[in-house]
Image (cartoon, helix red, strand yellow):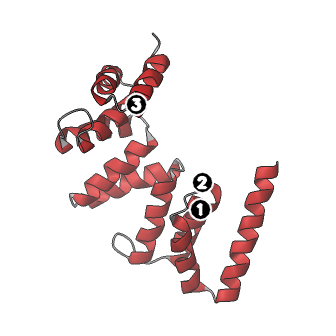
Amino acid sequence: MSIIKKYQYALKLHEKEEYKKAYDYFLELANSNDANSQEMVANMLYHGSGVKEDKECALDWYEKAAINGNIEAQYWYGRKKLEQDHIDEGIFWIKKSANNNYSDALRSLGLYYLDEKYFNKNVNKAIILLKKAFFEYGNKEAFPDLLYALGIKYNKWKVLSIIIKNTFEMFLKKLK
Protein backbone atom coordinates (compact mmCIF):
# COMPACT_ATOMS: atom_id res chain seq x y z
CA MET A 1 0.00 0.00 0.00
CA SER A 2 1.35 3.46 -0.90
CA ILE A 3 2.03 6.14 1.70
CA ILE A 4 -0.97 8.16 0.53
CA LYS A 5 -3.31 5.16 0.73
CA LYS A 6 -2.01 4.22 4.18
CA TYR A 7 -2.51 7.77 5.36
CA GLN A 8 -6.05 7.92 3.94
CA TYR A 9 -6.83 4.55 5.53
CA ALA A 10 -5.50 5.77 8.88
CA LEU A 11 -7.65 8.91 8.59
CA LYS A 12 -10.73 6.76 7.98
CA LEU A 13 -9.90 4.66 11.03
CA HIS A 14 -9.48 7.86 13.03
CA GLU A 15 -12.85 9.18 11.83
CA LYS A 16 -14.46 5.89 12.90
CA GLU A 17 -12.83 6.42 16.32
CA GLU A 18 -10.67 3.32 15.87
CA TYR A 19 -7.87 5.31 17.40
CA LYS A 20 -5.45 2.53 18.35
CA LYS A 21 -5.39 1.09 14.82
CA ALA A 22 -5.17 4.57 13.31
CA TYR A 23 -2.31 5.47 15.62
CA ASP A 24 -0.35 2.38 14.57
CA TYR A 25 -0.64 3.36 10.88
CA PHE A 26 0.18 7.02 11.57
CA LEU A 27 3.18 6.04 13.69
CA GLU A 28 4.56 3.80 10.94
CA LEU A 29 4.23 6.63 8.43
CA ALA A 30 5.56 9.21 10.90
CA ASN A 31 8.68 7.12 11.40
CA SER A 32 9.10 7.24 7.61
CA ASN A 33 9.20 11.06 7.85
CA ASP A 34 5.64 11.77 6.63
CA ALA A 35 4.89 15.23 8.07
CA ASN A 36 1.11 14.83 8.05
CA SER A 37 1.36 11.56 9.95
CA GLN A 38 3.82 13.12 12.37
CA GLU A 39 1.27 15.83 13.10
CA MET A 40 -1.48 13.23 13.62
CA VAL A 41 0.75 11.23 16.01
CA ALA A 42 1.43 14.47 17.91
CA ASN A 43 -2.29 15.27 18.14
CA MET A 44 -3.17 11.77 19.29
CA LEU A 45 -0.45 11.76 21.93
CA TYR A 46 -1.33 15.26 23.07
CA HIS A 47 -5.01 14.40 23.53
CA GLY A 48 -4.60 10.76 24.53
CA SER A 49 -6.62 9.48 21.55
CA GLY A 50 -6.09 5.73 21.43
CA VAL A 51 -2.79 6.03 23.27
CA LYS A 52 -1.64 7.17 26.68
CA GLU A 53 -1.51 10.95 26.81
CA ASP A 54 2.10 12.13 26.56
CA LYS A 55 2.42 15.86 25.99
CA GLU A 56 6.23 15.79 26.05
CA CYS A 57 6.42 13.15 23.33
CA ALA A 58 3.68 14.99 21.42
CA LEU A 59 5.83 18.12 21.43
CA ASP A 60 8.70 16.15 19.88
CA TRP A 61 6.38 14.95 17.09
CA TYR A 62 5.00 18.48 16.55
CA GLU A 63 8.58 19.68 16.15
CA LYS A 64 9.41 16.95 13.61
CA ALA A 65 6.25 17.68 11.63
CA ALA A 66 6.92 21.44 11.78
CA ILE A 67 10.48 20.98 10.51
CA ASN A 68 9.11 18.76 7.72
CA GLY A 69 6.74 21.53 6.60
CA ASN A 70 3.36 20.70 8.12
CA ILE A 71 1.82 24.16 8.62
CA GLU A 72 -0.63 23.07 11.33
CA ALA A 73 2.22 21.51 13.28
CA GLN A 74 4.26 24.69 12.82
CA TYR A 75 1.42 26.64 14.41
CA TRP A 76 0.80 24.21 17.27
CA TYR A 77 4.50 23.74 17.97
CA GLY A 78 4.84 27.52 18.11
CA ARG A 79 1.90 27.78 20.51
CA LYS A 80 3.35 25.11 22.78
CA LYS A 81 6.74 26.86 22.79
CA LEU A 82 5.02 30.14 23.77
CA GLU A 83 3.29 28.32 26.64
CA GLN A 84 6.76 27.26 27.82
CA ASP A 85 7.94 30.89 27.58
CA HIS A 86 10.24 30.14 24.64
CA ILE A 87 9.00 33.31 23.00
CA ASP A 88 11.44 33.69 20.09
CA GLU A 89 11.08 30.06 19.03
CA GLY A 90 7.30 30.14 19.42
CA ILE A 91 6.92 33.31 17.36
CA PHE A 92 9.31 31.92 14.73
CA TRP A 93 7.08 28.86 14.16
CA ILE A 94 3.81 30.77 14.26
CA LYS A 95 5.17 33.29 11.73
CA LYS A 96 6.35 30.42 9.54
CA SER A 97 2.86 28.91 9.65
CA ALA A 98 1.27 32.30 8.91
CA ASN A 99 3.65 32.79 5.98
CA ASN A 100 2.24 29.50 4.68
CA ASN A 101 -1.26 30.97 5.11
CA TYR A 102 -2.52 28.81 7.97
CA SER A 103 -5.55 30.83 9.09
CA ASP A 104 -5.19 30.15 12.83
CA ALA A 105 -1.61 31.42 12.67
CA LEU A 106 -2.69 34.53 10.75
CA ARG A 107 -5.36 35.22 13.36
CA SER A 108 -3.01 34.64 16.30
CA LEU A 109 -0.34 36.94 14.90
CA GLY A 110 -2.99 39.58 14.30
CA LEU A 111 -4.06 39.33 17.92
CA TYR A 112 -0.45 39.45 19.11
CA TYR A 113 0.00 42.76 17.26
CA LEU A 114 -3.07 44.11 19.08
CA ASP A 115 -2.31 43.01 22.63
CA GLU A 116 1.40 43.91 22.75
CA LYS A 117 2.29 40.66 24.51
CA TYR A 118 4.96 39.69 21.97
CA PHE A 119 5.26 42.77 19.73
CA ASN A 120 4.86 46.50 19.86
CA LYS A 121 1.25 47.36 19.11
CA ASN A 122 0.70 47.63 15.37
CA VAL A 123 -2.96 47.94 14.43
CA ASN A 124 -2.16 48.10 10.70
CA LYS A 125 -0.33 44.75 10.74
CA ALA A 126 -3.10 43.27 12.88
CA ILE A 127 -5.74 44.39 10.36
CA ILE A 128 -3.81 42.95 7.41
CA LEU A 129 -3.40 39.57 9.12
CA LEU A 130 -6.97 39.39 10.40
CA LYS A 131 -8.42 40.41 7.01
CA LYS A 132 -6.38 37.68 5.35
CA ALA A 133 -7.43 35.09 7.94
CA PHE A 134 -11.11 35.91 7.53
CA PHE A 135 -11.59 37.01 3.93
CA GLU A 136 -9.03 34.85 2.17
CA TYR A 137 -8.97 31.75 4.37
CA GLY A 138 -12.42 31.75 5.96
CA ASN A 139 -11.41 31.80 9.61
CA LYS A 140 -14.73 32.84 11.16
CA GLU A 141 -13.15 33.40 14.57
CA ALA A 142 -11.07 36.20 13.04
CA PHE A 143 -14.13 38.30 12.16
CA PRO A 144 -14.88 39.79 15.60
CA ASP A 145 -11.15 40.37 16.08
CA LEU A 146 -11.04 42.16 12.74
CA LEU A 147 -14.01 44.34 13.71
CA TYR A 148 -12.27 45.22 16.96
CA ALA A 149 -9.01 46.10 15.18
CA LEU A 150 -10.80 48.17 12.55
CA GLY A 151 -12.75 49.94 15.31
CA ILE A 152 -9.50 51.03 16.94
CA LYS A 153 -8.41 52.78 13.77
CA TYR A 154 -11.62 53.89 12.03
CA ASN A 155 -15.10 55.18 12.77
CA LYS A 156 -18.05 52.79 12.39
CA TRP A 157 -18.92 53.97 8.86
CA LYS A 158 -15.41 53.40 7.59
CA VAL A 159 -15.40 49.95 9.26
CA LEU A 160 -18.70 49.13 7.55
CA SER A 161 -17.39 50.26 4.16
CA ILE A 162 -14.21 48.17 4.57
CA ILE A 163 -16.23 45.08 5.46
CA ILE A 164 -18.63 45.57 2.53
CA LYS A 165 -15.78 46.18 0.06
CA ASN A 166 -13.85 43.09 1.20
CA THR A 167 -16.98 40.92 1.23
CA PHE A 168 -17.78 42.01 -2.32
CA GLU A 169 -14.20 41.28 -3.47
CA MET A 170 -14.35 37.85 -1.79
CA PHE A 171 -17.55 36.95 -3.64
CA LEU A 172 -16.11 38.16 -6.96
CA LYS A 173 -13.07 35.91 -6.50
CA LYS A 174 -15.36 32.95 -5.83
CA LEU A 175 -17.28 33.63 -9.06
CA LYS A 176 -14.13 33.43 -11.17
The location of residue 136, given as percent across then percent down, is 64, 56
How dense is the environment of label 3, judged by Cα within 10 Å: few (below 14), some, or many (20 and up)?
few
Q: Secondary structure at mark 1?
A: helix
Residue extending farthest to the front is 16
Q: Which mark is residue 134?
A: 1
How dense is the environment of label 1, judged by Cα within 10 Å: few (below 14), some, or many (20 and up)?
many
Quickly name the residue at label 2: 137
Between tags 3 and 2, which lies in front?
Answer: 3
Q: Is residue 105 visible?
A: yes
Determine whether 85 is above or below 56 in the image: below
Residue at left offset 36%, top offset 21%: 29
Please state which amino acid type lies under the numbered disc 3: Lys
Which quadrant of the figure has residue 30? top left
Marks 3 and 2 sit apart, C-alpha to C-alpha, by: 28 Å
Quickly name the residue at label 3: 16
Marks 1 and 3 sit apart, C-alpha to C-alpha, by: 31 Å
Residue at left offset 23%, top offset 40%: 48
Residue extending farthest to the top is 1
Residue 28 located left or right of residue 6: left
Are the residues tagged 1 and 2 within 8 Å (C-beta)? Answer: yes
Determine whether 146 is above or below 54 in the image: below
Residue at left offset 43%, top offset 29%: 11
